[in-house]
Image (cartoon, helix red, strand yellow):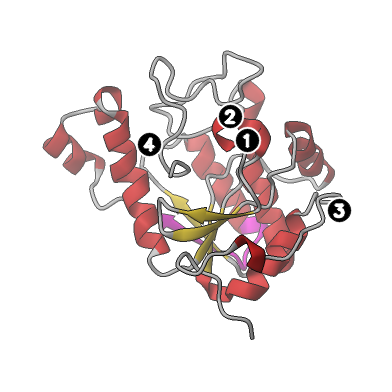
Amino acid sequence: MAALINYENFNTGDFPVFPEGSETKGALEVLQWANDHYGDKLIYACSFGIEGIVLTDLLAKVNPSAKIVFLDTDVHFEETYQLIEEVKKRYPKLLIEMKKPDLTLEEQAAKYGDELWLRDSNKCCNIRKIVPLTDVLSSATAWLSGLRREQSETRAKTEYINKDNKFKSVKICPLIHWTWKDVWRYAHKNGLPYNVLHDNGYPSIGCKTCTAPAFNADDLRSGRWQGAQKTECGLHLS
């Protein structure tokens, strides 16, 4: 068996060439390779947006009992929690973990003040997303993400397999060549459940405290952190 490719020995020349022109634009092939290569050392960190639902469906075809982690910040929309329950029913063998931060909202408020997200959203994201994912990835070698190149300028150069300097891990992004239309076409064709907020002007859905309907049709993430010089929570910034 080939040596496991990890952060320390990462070399782009060690990866196979995936068929961008396949029916799933390489996604299914990437997932099959990742599952075969990493096994239980592979984790999918899913936000359960529409890309996440599509990637979950594809992953379930490769490994029906794959491990999925949701970073439960305790301030997600109720619609998001409802969707996760639907996903659990549709894919009963998937291992879905609701990963919470070490600090409850009350403990965070006592330490940093109420509504930290309004005063220092970066610190809030660090406490409720970055630190929990760091903990999750401490037992994994690679993780899956639903990033697409079309989503934003900061994601335009994402590859299928990436050296993740943020988490000292290998980040695998099977959907990089998918367009917004591709995602929805697949979801509708396969009758997938999705967050109803997508039908109400929310193409990108995060915490309810920092997510509003998109105001720019050409920027699907324009509803995130409105009024702040911020486009990412930090999970995908090196």
The residue type indicated by label 4 comes to: Val
Mark nearer the N terminus (2 vs 4): 4
Q: Return the mark for residue 22.
A: 3
Mark 2 or mark 3: whose residue is earlier in sequence: 3
Residue tagged 4? 75
In this rendered view, identify the residue nearer to me: 50 or 176. Answer: 176
Q: Nearer the viewer, mark 2 or mark 3?
A: 2
Distance, label 2 to label 3, CA atoms, is 25 Å
Q: Sequence order check: which comes first, mark 1 or mark 4?
A: 4
- Camera-side mark, 1 or 3: 1
Q: Measuring 20% from the left and 40% from the top, which residue is drawn there?
A: 108
Q: Is residue 101 above or below residue 3?
A: above
Q: Residue at x 63, y 81 (%)?
A: 2
Q: Which residue is mark 1?
A: 156
Nearer the observer, 148 or 217: 148
Q: Which residues are magenta?
A: 89-99
Q: Position of residue 13 (x, y in %)?
A: 65, 64
Q: Look at the image and tell me in which quarter the C terminus lies.
A: top left
171 left or right of 133? right
35 relative to 150, above or below: below
Residue 35 appears in the rendering = yes
